[in-house]
Image (tube, rainbow, N blue to C red):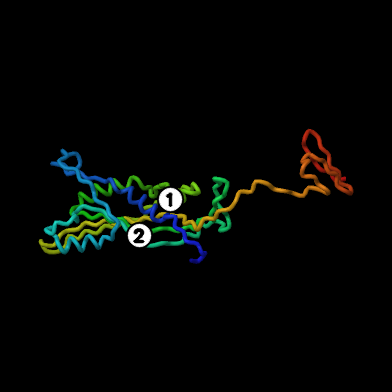
Amino acid sequence: MLNNKVFYHGIIRKSIVAFGSLFSNIHIDRREGNSVDGTIVQRLQIPLAYAPKEKWLVRLDSDPNLEGHTYTSLPRMSFEITGYTYDASRKLPKLNKIGCVKNGSSDNVFSPVPYNLDISLYVLTKTQEDALQIIEQILPTFTPDYTMAINAIPDLNIVQDIPIILNSINVQDEYDGDFQTRRFVTHTLTFTLKLNIFGATDNQGVIETVNANIGQDETFGNPNQIYVADGDVTTATVANESWTNNF
């Protein structure tokens, strides 16, 4: 390894899991009559998976009637990582340390490295009405950002606030083709997660005693002893406070 240490904090994985949890409980209603205030006849939970949208599109194209009895159906959502970018605007002094003292020792880690994680969320539906119900449940949460907290390094009690920024939404309605071609309505939402990636942690003892040279022939057994320096500098003690006057 680059620093001869093997470590893994799981920060990226924790961020992905937290991101997916935001969209894991979205439902849509099938209504009788008016699609907005009609009588609800069915409520569906939207499946969510970590996978590229092409995986689901290929499966649906190869079996448009779902005769293969697979779990792939519409509507559904998926998301995937699309890239990493270093964020110089959030850079901290690299020699700064974050520490935690416990059990007579100190665990510390250097300042994290800021990276932006790009994620795409795909909403695949058969109709625009289903897509609009899902999108309207997502957009009010982001203005255009939403902040969530993750336990980055439990051993150091480091909890990080991760801003999630909604950058854009693209719509693709594949309605062209013959009557045997299945229609797909795809909404692609692009997000940016502002992460802080930590390096390896170090462990060292806690400094409990410090010896300082404060004068000539100092006696450590008598910390209240008053010393007088040579020359034109005098030291006096009044009301347990000391000061130095230069003449």
Q: Residue furthest right?
A: 231
Q: Is 155 above or below relative to 53? A: above
Tell me: 159 left or right of 225.
Answer: left
Secondary structure category for the residue under label 1: strand
> What is the crowding at mark 2: few (fewer than 14 residues within 10 Å), some, or many (at least 20)?
some
> What is the crowding at mark 1: few (fewer than 14 residues within 10 Å), some, or many (at least 20)?
many
- What separation in Å lies between label 2 and label 1 (alpha carbons)? 16 Å
Please give the residue where the numbered disc 1 appears in the rendered image: 162
Q: Which mark is residue 81?
A: 2
Give percent across and percent down for residue 118: 38, 59
Q: Is 138 above or below relative to 200? A: above
Counting residues from the start of the chain, the first of labels 2 and 1 encountered is: 2
Q: Is 147 above or below relative to 94? A: above
Give percent across and percent down for residue 202: 54, 55
Q: Residue furthest left?
A: 179
- Which residue is rendered at x = 41% and y = 62% of the image? 84
User: Do the CB atoms of the residues marked 2 and 1 lie less than 8 Å apart?
Assistant: no
Give percent across and percent down for residue 40: 17, 39
Q: Residue furthest bottom?
A: 2
